[in-house]
Image: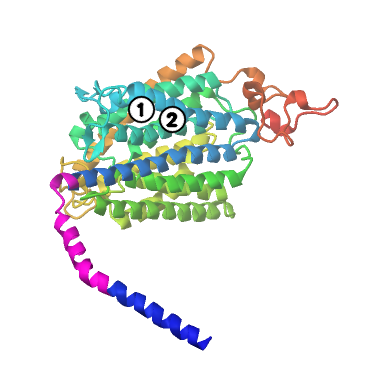
Amino acid sequence: MRIWKRHHFWSRLAIMAICTMILAVFGTKMVFAQDAEVTAPSMDDIANLKISIDTAWVFVAGFLVFLMQLGFAILETGMIQQTSAVNALLENFTEAGISAIFWWICGFGIAFGASSGGLFGTTLFMPGLEAANTPFVGNISVLTMFFFQFAFAATASTITTGAMAERTDFIGHLIYNVLIVALIYPVVVHWIWGGGWLFQQGFFDFAGGTVVHTVGAVICLIGAKMLGPRKGKIWGKPLTAHNLGLALIGTLILWFGWYGFNPGSTLGITGGAASTVGIVVLNTSLGAGAGMLSSMIFQYFRTGKWDLIATMNGTLAGLVIVTPGCAFISPLAALILGLVGGVLVLLVTDLIEKLKIDDAVGAFAVHGGGGIVGTLAIGLFAEPTLTPFAANIKAGFGGLLIPGGSADILITQIIGVAAVVLWCTVTSVLMFSVLKAVGHLRVNPKAETDGNFIDAYEHGQTIWPDILPLPEDVPAGKTVPATAVGD
C-alpha cells in the first residue's frame, strides 16, 4: 500500500509538470492573441450601454409602481367592511387593465405628445403602431416611458376608488375610471411633465405630489361628497375596518412600491441621475418614518391609545408629502415635512368628517393634504444646488426659507396647485353629475336594503362565505349577520 501511494504521488507530480510546460510554451501566445483582438469601446458602445442600464432601471421602477395597485387593493379591502370587500378588490383590479388600454389609446398622447398651446398633447397616440422604440427622453424610448407613466396613471385612478368605496355603482366606476385616465389626469400631466404651460412657468413636481396625488385626491373628494355617506354611517364615528392585518400588508406594499415611484422618476440611473437617486431614496425613507412616528404619537396624546390606522395613514402621508420635492430638498427638510404630514393627515381627516364627507379610507387626507402641502413646500425648502436637475427654469433659485432664497418658486407652486385643483374640481363635478343623472353614480338601493349588501347584489360573491354568506345561502329561520347591512 505504501508503494502504491508513493507511485500515485509521482504520477500526479508528473502530470502537473507536463501541464506547466504546455502553459509556458503556448499560454503566452494565446494571451497575446486575445489581447490583440481587444479594442477600446466606441462612443456608440458606451451610449448603448447607458440606454440599456437606464431602460432596465425605469422598467424595474415601473414594476414597483405597478405593484402599488396590489397595495391599494389590499389596504382598501382591509379598511372597509367585509360586505364590500369583493367590490373593492374587483374595482382595483379592473383599474389596472382599463388604465393600460385607455392610457395607450389617448392618455399618453394627451400627456406627452407635441404641445398645443401648452394645454394638451396632439401626437404619440397608440404608441408602438408607428414609433416603436424611438428615443423619447434621455436614454429611454417612447415605449419605456409609456409603461412607466401607465403605472402612474393607474395609481391616480385608484386613489379615487378608495374614498368612494362601499357605495359606488360598478358600471359608474368603470366609466369614471376611463374618463380619469383618458382625459382628466393626462391634461395635468401635460401641463407639468409634458412641457405644458406650468412647466414653462417653472413649476416643480418631481414624482407626482400634484400630478398624481392631488389629482386623485380632489376627484375622490368630489365623488365622495356627491355620493353621500355609506349606509349606517354615524358622523364622528368611523365604520369598523374589517381586517387591519390586510390593511397593514397593503400599507407596507405601498411603502415598498414608493421606492419605484420616487427614485424611478429620475428616468435613468446613469450620469447625473445616479447621484440624485441617493437623495431621493433617503428623503423618501425619512418622510415615511417621520410621518409614522408623528401620527402615532399625536394620536396617542389625543386618545390615549396607540392607533394602528392612524399610524398607517401617517406613514402614507409622510411618503406623499415628500414626493413632489424629494429630489429638491435636504434630508432635514424631508424629516420636517414627514413630521408635519403625520399630524396633518389626522387633522384633515377630522375636518372632512366635520364637513360630512364620507371618505371611506381617508384618501383625501393622505393624498390631498400631503400632495398639496408637499408641493407648496418646495417653494420653502428647495435647495439651489438640487432644483436645476428638474428644469433649467429658475435654476439656482432657492426656497423662501433657504438662505438667499426668494418667493419666486413658492408663487409658481401656488399658481400651479390652484390651477390643478380648479381643473379637477370642474371636470369631476361634470363627470359625477352626469353619472348621477343617469343613475350610475351610487349603487342600486336594493344593494343597501336589510338582508342584502353590495357584494351580493353587484357580484353574487362574498369574501368570507363561511362568516358572511350570501342572502340566498342563509338557512331558513336565520338572518344575514348585522355586518351584511352596513351597521
Whether residue 339 sits left or right of residue 111 in the image: it is right
The amino acid at mark 2 is Ser
Residue 260 in the image, given as x and y percentages of width and height: 38, 45
Which secondary structure type mostly characterizes the magenta part of the structure?
helix
Whether tag 2 and tag 1 are in contact, CB under 8 A, the answer is yes
Q: Residue under circle 2? A: 157
Whether residue 230 sits left or right of residue 477 in the image: it is left
How far apart in space, not on screen, are marks 2 and 1 (Cα)? Answer: 9 Å
Residue 35 in the image, given as x and y percentages of width and height: 17, 60
Q: Is residue 391 visible?
A: yes
Q: Residue under circle 1? A: 185
Residue 67 magenta-drawn?
no
Magenta-highlighted residues: 21-45
Secondary element at image label 1: helix
Which sits in the foreground, 203 or 63? Answer: 63
Secondary element at image label 2: helix
